Structure formats: structure tokens, C-alpha cells
Amino acid sequence: MPSSSGSAAAFASGRTAPAGLREAVSPSAFSVASFAEDAEGTGRLSVDRQEFFESARQTARMAMPPDHVTTVTGRDGSDGTIAERFPVPETDGPEGLPGTGEAVCGPGTAVTDESVAGRHELVVGGLTYLGQVAETYLVLRDASGALMLLDQHAAHERVLYERLRKGAFAGTAQCLALPLELALQPVEEERFLEVRDNLERMGFDVSCSGGRLLARGIPPSLSRSEAGEFLREVLAGRKDDIRAMFISLSCKGAIKAGQRLADDEAAALLRQWLHTPEREYCPHGRPSILRWDAVALEKLFKRRQ
């Protein structure tokens, strides 16, 4: 098998050989001309090109971890290998290479729709959930086939904000086994008397006596530390109106960026978000959803102006 430290010769279309093959195929071993089809356009591969692809298959077999490889018998009776758990990338390569509907290393191992037929599509309100990217964005497809990305934090933030505005958290405080105590300055005590009703509306069970605030219950969406931080901000006057309090509380209680969601959790968030007014933006004004139809995607890929 030819070997070199350089990259493999490019396909006639200009593609570079996969990184795993670069060290095993010499760029000087095959000329660009030898990669062309015969003059009559029959589609048959030249001898050099057949040798190149056979070398590529053998190299891939050697590089593949043993527990990820299965040996199968091709249509011509020869043995090939396929990666059981690795997806086949789509390119325009020749037979037996990615893009032909066949496994990378198996000349007779066609990949068909049946291999993914068992995956159940998760559809919520006309949107198909496809997965999560960067543990932050939910990948969706709408009824027209357009691609959508939903920011999970911004979406949940809007859901919580609207629920706070409607007083949905009143009386829903989660009781603390050990009450949260905060020492207050006189000015903070006065501030507490002004905002107490709003705090209870947000799901707090709080009282104040002798210069100390005692929180026996906090909103179910907040951790103990988040609740303490929020109360400090409010009592210090950094949140001057009820809207600012709602925005701060919804931000602290919302699902965070970088948080992995199970399919049922993503579906629950999507369902709540779809029933929320002004859902296209979070309370801070950032977009919560982006959408690309076929035309927009073609422009992104410079397929059209």
C-alpha cells in the first residue's frame, strides 16, 4: 500500500481525501487524469482509480476500532467492513464511498431508510423536534420543511415571565427545611414592606422581624442560592419596578444554556413556549427563535444571490 505524510490526491471534483486516509495514500501515486472516466463516458473507473479506492477501503479497515466494525459479504462475494454506529456522510463520491447510499468500506452494504425507520419523530404543535445543538439550541423543522433553532434559555425565560405576570406562582412556594435568613439594613426593611406583596405573588413565603428577613418558601424554579441573590437585588433597590423583578426572576429560574435536555423535557418546553404570547423574543428583547426556509439556506450556501 502506498504511503506518504502528504495529503491524498484530490478527487476530480476538487475534494480532499478524508483525514484518516492522508497518511496512507501518496499524492504522487495517482494523477488527476487517471481519475477521469473513459472517453466514451461509460462511467467505468480506470485501473489506477480502482486501486486508489481499494487502498482507501483497506486503510479505513485498519483505522477502525475493532468493536465498531462488522465484516459482511458484498454482492460480489467479497468481504467488506462497515461502521455500525457511525453515520455515513453525504458527498458525491463513486461507488462504495460516501454519497452513494453504500457504506464507506463495504462494496455490498447498502444503507437504506430501514436502518433509521425505528426512530420515532417527536412532533409538537406542528413542529418536529430533531435534537439539541451545543446543549443550548433545540433543532426543529416546521410543516413547510424550514429549519428552526430555538434558544432553550430564552424560550423558557419568556414562559416564566408570562406566568409571573399572571400571578401563576402565587401560593406555589416550595417549603425549605431550613429557612433562608438575610440580615437587613433599615432601608432594606422599608423596601421589604413595599415589595412584600409582589414577592408573595412570585412564589415567596417571607416575613421580616428584628432586622432579619426569613424566607420559609421560595419559587419552585429557583435554587436556594438563586433565591437569596434575587432577594438581595430587590431589597437593594436594583430592581425598581415589578417588571424588572419579573425579568430577573424568570432569567434566574429558566433553563440554562449548556444544559442537556431529554426528549420529553424538550417537548414539554416546546409545548409551553408555543402557548406563550410574544414568544419570538425573551423578556430582555433577544430573539428566542431563528428560521431558515429553503431559499434562505440556499443564500447562506451561496447557491443563489
Image (spheres, helix red, strand yellow):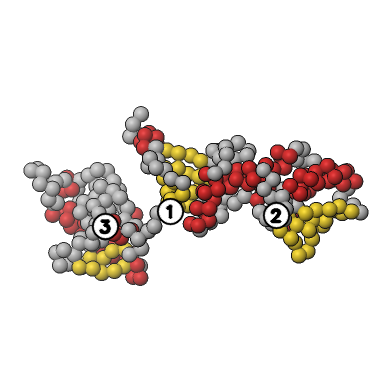
Residue 33 point in image, percent of width and height: 17, 45
Q: Which residue is mark 3?
A: 112
- Residue matched to label 2: 172
| Amino acid type assigned to the residue bearing label 3 in the image | Thr
Residue 119, horizontal then vertical, whole percent? 37, 58
Q: CA distance from mark 3 to mark 1?
A: 21 Å
- The spot of residue 13 in percent (x, y) is 24, 43
Q: Where's the C terminus, which quadrant? A: top left
Judge the density around disc 3: few (<14), some (14-19), many (≥20) Cα neighbours within 10 Å: few
Task: Tell me if mark 2 has few (under 14), some (14-19) or many (20+) residues whose alpha carbon lies within 10 angstroms of its own.
Answer: some
Judging depth in this view, the residue of 79 and 12 nearest the camera is 79
Identify the residue shown where x is 10% and y is 46%. 42
User: Is residue 139 among the parts visible in the rendering?
Assistant: no
Q: Please state which of residues 122 and 15 is positioned toward the viewer in this rendering.
A: 122
Residue matched to label 1: 122
What is the secondary structure assignment of the residue under circle 3?
Answer: loop
Q: Earlier in the sequence, mark 2 or mark 3?
A: 3
Determine the secondary structure under disc 2. loop
